[in-house]
Image: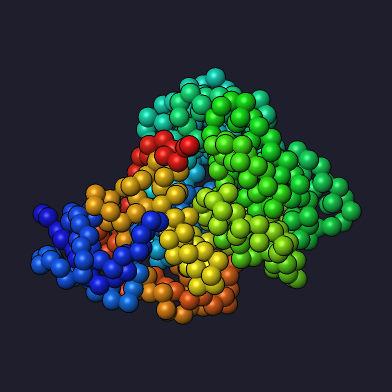
Amino acid sequence: MSSRTVIRHGLVITASDEIHADVLVEDGRIAALATPDSQSWTADRVIDATGKYVIPGGVDAHTHMELPFGGTHASDTFATGTRAAAWGGTTTIVDFAVQSVGHTLREGLDAWHAKAEGNCAIDYAFHMIVSDVNDETLKEMDLLIEEGITSFKQFMAYPGVFYSDDGQILRAMQRSAENGGLIMMHAENGIAIDVLVQQTLARGETDPRYHGEVRKALLEAEATHRAIRLAQVAGAPLYVVHVSATEAVTELARARDEGLNVFGETCPQYLFLSADNLAEPDFEGAKYVCSTPLRPREHQAALWRALRTNDLQVVSTDHCPFCFTGQKELGRGDFSKIPNGLPGVENRMDLLHQAVVDGRISRRRWIEIACATPARMFGLYPKKGTIAPGSDADIVLYDPHAEQVMSAATHHMNVDYSAYEGKRVTGRVETVLSRGEPVIVQREYTGRAGHGVFTPRSTCQYLN
Ligand code: URP
Ligand code: ZN
Ligand code: ZN
């Protein structure tokens, strides 16, 4: 049966436009936009958006629901994590399926499909973490692309777990140059970092703040440079994930000035938090252990500038939550045993809106870095990431004047702390539609696990 929704009197904001318009949704898709009250659309549901922004649902291109890490698992399941994402105005996640060493990509992908299927409140897609490049996995990359898994993460960090050496990276990049895949790089020199970890622990320096000190900005920059040059040799595009250091941004900007298809993502934690958090006493710093690490506050200016100049194109969360009690605590007395990752899937759209309020970015740039470009980068556009006829009706009504205080007491992520506890922000999600279905209605959850479906992706739509 056909269903129609009209959203009236809102300010529709996309990456390219801001227009006062009514939006007609039909059978889960956007059917039309028109001047307010210029038409006599009939509908089953009319939503009054007076005084609200009508924006595309957020596309979070970097999440880790249920990720096994350091002997434990990320605490959000696909059910809890996608529900929390919806509360925060995100309607699509791209999560990372994992190939464990000794297993095929297929085995890893099947396992992640099994975790997600029937459990998600919003639509989801997958990247593939490639931990073991060999002749078989290279062939499997081609097959995965046909199934809509078009991007592959490699790690220059975590020797013995996810790590790939330069030869393996080059081979995967050569393959992606042929098959259209996009290599996503965790760019940190993990071999050098592990030496510094051992030396630091041997001196008795075990506190969480040393996590930030051993994972040096120069070792992020060095790996970023190496990844860029390997991609150049292979003739492949490159997307560097969770960029946090000024020196790494410099490498990306230089490569882009040379005309290379090199892209970068940063995350809210690098824009709003710093190494000061890692130094919080009584092991509280463990709440902020992630890799790349939080940097001294001075690095934030370079990240904001790069977001304005498009040397960084995407803000994703790298949502990878571990509870303080029982999970982060695994690293008491040894910072290298603290599971790496921060919660944030619920906070991204609001934190970036705060950047609009603070005058750091424009409203359209907010939508570009949080919705449109991640959709383009990962082959989901214009199905996701915009409000246009034919697009999925993934729509958020956003109240730009509401005030909120971020807190674990009120968030919906399955984690016992907030990285932004007590932070006041202006702006709040009010209503969320996913393919036309109400998931949040005036801050009541109306969604359901299983509404969200796997969404195959085309190859990168952002290349020069
Ligand atoms: O600390 C982080 N970022 N944890 C998740 C895994 C990764 O490297 O993205
Ligand atoms: Zn990573
Ligand atoms: Zn990650």
The part of the image, by quadrant, that contains residue 430 is bottom left
Furthest residue to the top? 135
Give the camera-side residue of 167 and 358.
Answer: 358
Residue 386 in the figure: left or right of residue 365: left
Counting the numbered discs, the total is 0
Residue 100 in the figure: left or right of residue 283: left
Is residue 96 something that shows in the picture? yes
Residue ID at (35%, 69%):
53
Furthest residue to the right? 203
Residue 125, placed above or below residue 173: below
Residue 169 in the figure: left or right of residue 393: right
Residue 143, placed above or below residue 267: above
Residue 378 in the figure: left or right of residue 216: left
Residue ID at (40%, 56%):
15
Is residue 416 something that shows in the picture? no
Place of residue 277 in the rendered image (x, y in percent of width and height, measured from the top left): 69, 67
Place of residue 359 in the rendered image (x, y in percent of width and height, measured from the top left): 53, 70
Locate the N terminus by quadrant.
Answer: bottom left
